[in-house]
Image: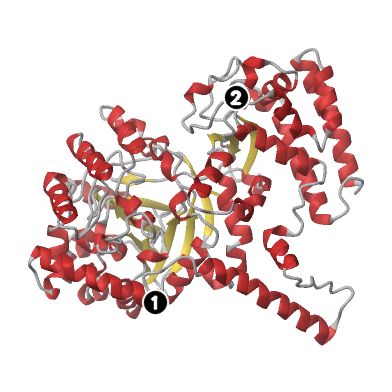
Amino acid sequence: MEYADNVKMPDNELINLEKSPWGLEQGVSHSNFLEIFEPLPELKELLLKAESIDEARNLAQKFSGELLIKCKNGEIASKPVERWLCEEAIGVFMNLTSEYMENVAGFSTLEYLWRATKGDENVLSVITEGFVEEFRHLFRAMAGKADYSKGWLGQMLSERGVEFVDFDRIKGRKAAEIRSKHLDEAWRIIKGYVDRYPTGLDDAIIEKRKKQKEKLIEFWGIDEDRWNSYKWQFSHVLKREKGLQILKELNELGIVKVPEDNLKLVELAIENHIPWGITPYYLHLWDFEEPYRHDMHVRRQVMPPEWYVMNMLGHKDDREIYFDFMGEHDTSPVDLVTRRYAMIAIVKPYETCPQICVYCQRNWEVTEPFMANAFPGWEKIERAIEWFGEHDSMIDVLITGGDPLALSDKTLERIIGRVAEFDHVANIRIGSRVIVTVPMRITENLAEMLGSYIEPGKRNLSVSTHFETAYEVTPEVSEAAYRLRKYGIIIYNQHVYHRMVSRRFENVVLRIALKKAGVEPYYTFFPKGKIEQKDYLIPIARIVQEGKEEARLLPGVFRGDEPVFNVPRMGKNHLRAWQDRELIAVKPDGSRVYLMHPWEKGISETKPYTYSDVPIKEYLDFLESMGESLEDYRTIWYYY
């Protein structure tokens, strides 16, 4: 029997929870645990009755089958949406009690549930509230008692006395007026969330950053023209000991407040060759006086947390393999080329960037900004480009890295010109973040040169970038984007939906800011599930919830992005599509285990991939620590 490609055949022993990185407190009382069965007391009695795990499985599956029939017949939940959720939840429970899925996951969720129900102190001492909350909500949904149908926004509208429009009862102009009133009130609620998040296009933020820029200009002893030169920006990136010393001086002078523990972690990172670097332009996006209040997301883009540093440090000798989450070593047919799809591949002519993102996918090969030997030489680049010429399936070529726009115009023109020689290439993409980190790099000359490779009806050229927050969308960014658009170049955003930017409507604010700046939403990436980046990870349920409950309220052209999960060695799975994943287990710490079905399913033979997720409880605790109301996220448990 075949299982997922990253699963070793298990012995089905209980998991050692000490290996969990999430830090949720272990141990629950028996009486508190039994409260999860309040919606389904019959299931509790069956598990108490069972004398073995096999008997518990048989009883649970028989109960589930009978419950599913009742659910489909409308005997449990009268509202259509509650009935649908009931079916989904029962399907999940059937997975959790399946012996096959236990073998795939490598442990038995049912065994934890059964033993805890019977009062096994060994089990009760290791499970967490995360595990308990998963089943509390799952059993509510199975019983048709999730109170999901109104939704969190509908509940707020109801509390404001806004009438739901039943178009079967009310017709014509009266129905339209009631519906319009309903939508107006919905917007007022939405706007209350949207207004929480300042953007780089707000007048107050623009003025504040103007003053901050003036302080940095004075510190460096330069004028505005030098500041606006990308060459100056490139040559003054904060990196290594010198960059850290500058950051310390700025802190000591009271120009930029930097917490002492942040400085110590950067120092440790530099000593151990862990990637770190900030452009002067990006530094001026911070809030100089109030660290981590409104600028947490931009600071955490570049300032590494302790967990990250210690994990990188622990694997400094084998990081090239250990941190290659996407398995690029296994998907590179020739040097500098990575291929996971039939009609597109990437080429990496420059394996470094002007600035380092802490959660970089390629932190196993990018060691610092403008690192030595990042340019592999023309012989390797020519061989990589020739590979594209030899494969007429390559209708799209993504030139990325690192950041290719850190190269000179002349070097770029030579690379792009070679790719443009192949008639089968219909699109050339430039993967770059300089529009975010050094927008002055997008000069008129660069934009004109890139645009010159567009031949209507034959070839297009576009730019893919990464904006993570509306705080990064500035007037300088808007001007850079406009320069590219003047020459017919479309800019697509690939947003990494990490926890620093995952509050209610935070990504909606980004989408609106991007639209103002002329950047098109393209992908919303689930963060790569690399454990060294634990502080950035979110549950899959949150990104799905965001797409269904927040992004869906935007006009279509504002939400053209697709939420995706990257399966190692295979590529993007669509998180909108329930067919692409199954929830197969829940660990004692509350982590969901998913079986991801790669995109090739239905096209050609492939193997699924198992992924252990962030416990929803741990993520909600994080949101609460940031001052969020957990009531706003109450439906997250029902996104499987």
Above/below status of 209 relative to 590: below
Residue beneath disc 1:
456
Relative horizontal placement of residue 634, taking residue 373 as reference (left or right): right
Identified at 85% across, 34% down, the residue is 65
Q: Residues within 10 Å of mark 2 (few under 14, many from 20)?
A: some
* Mark 2 or mark 1, earlier in chain: 2
Q: Quadrant of residue 156?
A: bottom right
Q: Which mark is residue 27?
A: 2
Relative horizontal placement of residue 188, taking residue 60 as reference (left or right): left
Marks 2 and 1 sit apart, C-alpha to C-alpha, by 65 Å
Above/below status of 58 relative to 452: above
Amino acid tagged 1: Pro
Q: Position of residue 534 (x, y in %)?
A: 43, 39
Quick one: which residue is furthest to the bottom in this view? 173
Tag 2, which secondary structure?
Answer: loop
Residue 174 visible to the viewer: yes
Quick one: which residue is furthest to the left in this view? 221
Q: Mark 2–mark 1 contact, CB under 8 Å?
A: no
